[in-house]
Image (tube, grey):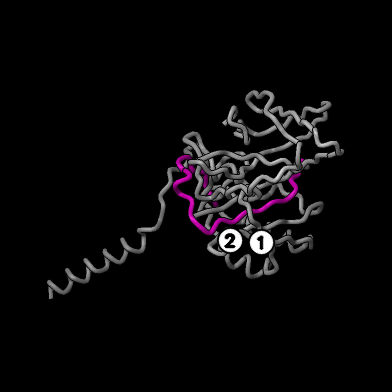
Amino acid sequence: MKNLICLLIIATVCVLLIGCSETTMYTPNNDMAFVTGLMENAKPEESALKFYCYDNDGIRTSTIFIKDTIQEILDGLNAVKAYEIIDWSLDDISLPIYGFEIKGKNNWLMSVAWTNGVWITQDGKAYTFDYDFKNLEQSYFRNSNKLSCFSFFPCSRLLTQNEKGWNSSLLSPAEMLNPPHDVTVSYNSHNTDTISVNYMNNSGSEWLYGEGFRLQVLLNDIWYNICATLKRVFQRNTTTIHATALFATHSEDFA
């Protein structure tokens, strides 16, 4: 009988350990208690809510425009109890990854992401966040569109780069360049947050450029699309690109 009890205890302990083996333990910020309202700065009365998901089926997005429905979703997210953590890293990322975009009360775009039980804000803070996003998608975001590039995902820079370098597992390889004949772009100068490039048009035809700039980084001989904040500035034939950090372009001098 004693042997049977010992076996039962050992079996119970093994089951508990197996059940907890996939749980990641994080260190809380001692200055922060449990918090709620992580989406309270959203402005649903003036904005649609855009939902993102990246799983084994790829990247998809869906948008809701009905204000009452948006508020219902935000109320559910704001009710979640969370606490800020200080030791989350890119190594903790796993699929699926979820994200939201909505206009904030400061009239700027508000972006957040979630992966492996952690909520990541656009200013780099991380919180534990226990929520059933799969059920949320099935309930509200059934009609979705596919995305081909992770750089459009909310907080994609925070999910792909830290002080140690890039996480290329989430980056999307860049498409082959196909520029107009005799139209070139060359690197001019840069500082900590600005890249200046020169356009040269020897084609004999008039070409205009828009705001569709993309920045790419070269990792292990592969160019990847990366996220940046862009701002167009007209300066004759020179365009200044304002970015969130210093990146590589398709130029050996700048790689």
* Quarter of the view holding residue 79: bottom right
Nearest the camera: 221 or 134? 221
- SS at mark 2 in the image: strand
Q: Write the start and end of the magenta stretch as one range.
A: 82-106
Give the left or right position of residue 7, taking residue 111 as reference: left
Magenta stretch contains residue 176: no
Q: Percent x, y for residue 187?
A: 67, 28
* Quarter of the view holding residue 148: bottom right
Q: Which residue is mark 2?
A: 58
Q: CA distance from mark 1 to mark 2?
A: 7 Å
Nearest the camera: 122 or 56? 56
As shown in the figure, which amino acid type bears the numbered disc 1?
Answer: Lys
The residue under the point 55% across, 45% down is 159
The total of numbered circles placed on residues is 2
* Quarter of the view holding residue 2: bottom left
**Marking on residue 146:** 1
Neighbourhood count class around disc 2 (C-alpha, 10 Å): few under 14, some 14–19, many 20 upward: few
Give the left or right position of residue 135, taking residue 104 as reference: left
Query: In which quadrant of the rendered image does the N terminus lie?
Result: bottom left
Q: Quick check: 202 above or below 113?
A: above
The residue under the point 50% across, 44% down is 167
Q: Are marks 1 and 2 in contact (CB under 8 Å)?
A: yes
